Image (tube, grey):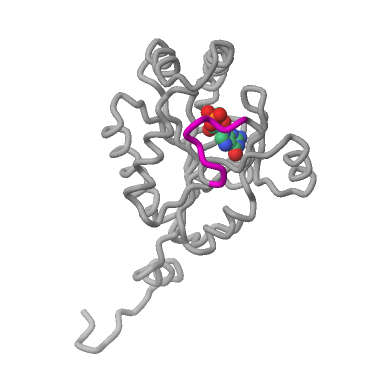
Amino acid sequence: MPGAGEKCRVKSQGELNLLDLIGYDEPPLLLIMSAPSGAGKSTICRRLLNQNKNLVFSVSTTTRSPRVDEVDGQDYHFVEEDVFKKMIRENAFLEWANVHGEYYGTSRQAVIDELKRGKDVMLDIDVQGGKQIKKLYPEAVMVFIAPPSMEELESRLRNRNTETEEEIKKRLENSRGELMELGNYDYLVVNESVEKAVSRLEAIRTAEKTRLERIKRGRPGL
Ligand code: 5GP
């Protein structure tokens, strides 16, 4: 036993590294949220964002038209197709995809800036985007939100009254393909109730932020 004022002798390099981690900075997370349309992802994401000041939402760019309650710059950056294509050419997107016939993309610079500020960044993107991000940045935490059943998914999609019948059909068809992509994800959260889903997401976030492997790696280098 070392006496008072005497330091513990560090036996190995491995041990030294671990001791250095005491008082560490929590590494910022890139949190990827995907779900079939109507699974309730937006409500869950909003709740999680409201209860965590250190978590920010990455506002995507899209060519789809705004819904009545959507605000440009807050829900999405709404642009015309030629603008979106120019942004692709300029490499402005970390990932982009055509989803249900419209273009959607994640701003590369905005995500990098927030991670550099030490913020956790939430991306609400489809499974094609999720695949691209996982390849680019394997440390991303991939969460798939699933509805309790396909019947429930259809009824939620219809009840929200934001899509035409044709769009609803397209989204339901796509949802089967989206569920097939589950294998790319780290976590599955079934949205039986918003409260339960949000509390599971809090648990995932806490676990990921305290993972020793992540702490050892430090800040993500996108
Ligand atoms: P909505 O039109 O309902 O807002 O979104 C349709 C789908 O596009 C959702 O699955 C949503 O997660 C996805 N999405 C939104 N933004 C992006 C993005 O920047 N990239 C990709 N790949 N998908 C996105």
Q: Is residue 168 left or right of residue 211?
A: right
Give the residue displayed 53% in from the left and 20% down from the top.
180
Give the residue displayed 53% in from the left and 58% down from the top.
114
- The majority secondary structure of the magenta stretch comes to loop
Give the residue displayed 65% in from the left and 41% down from the top.
95
> How many numbered dots are placed on residues in this image?
0
| Vertical placement of residue 140 versus 217, above or below | above
Q: Position of residue 194 (x, y in %)?
A: 30, 31
* Residue 29 shown in magenta: no
Kindly indicate the quadrant of the structure image that contains residue 193.
top left
Q: Magenta span covers which residues? A: 65-73
Q: Position of residue 209 (x, y in %)?
A: 39, 53
| Vertical placement of residue 97 versus 159, above or below | below
Viewer-closest of 69 and 85: 69
| Vertical placement of residue 182 versus 12, above or below | above
Viewer-closest of 145 and 45: 45
Kindly indicate the quadrant of the structure image that contains residue 112.
bottom right
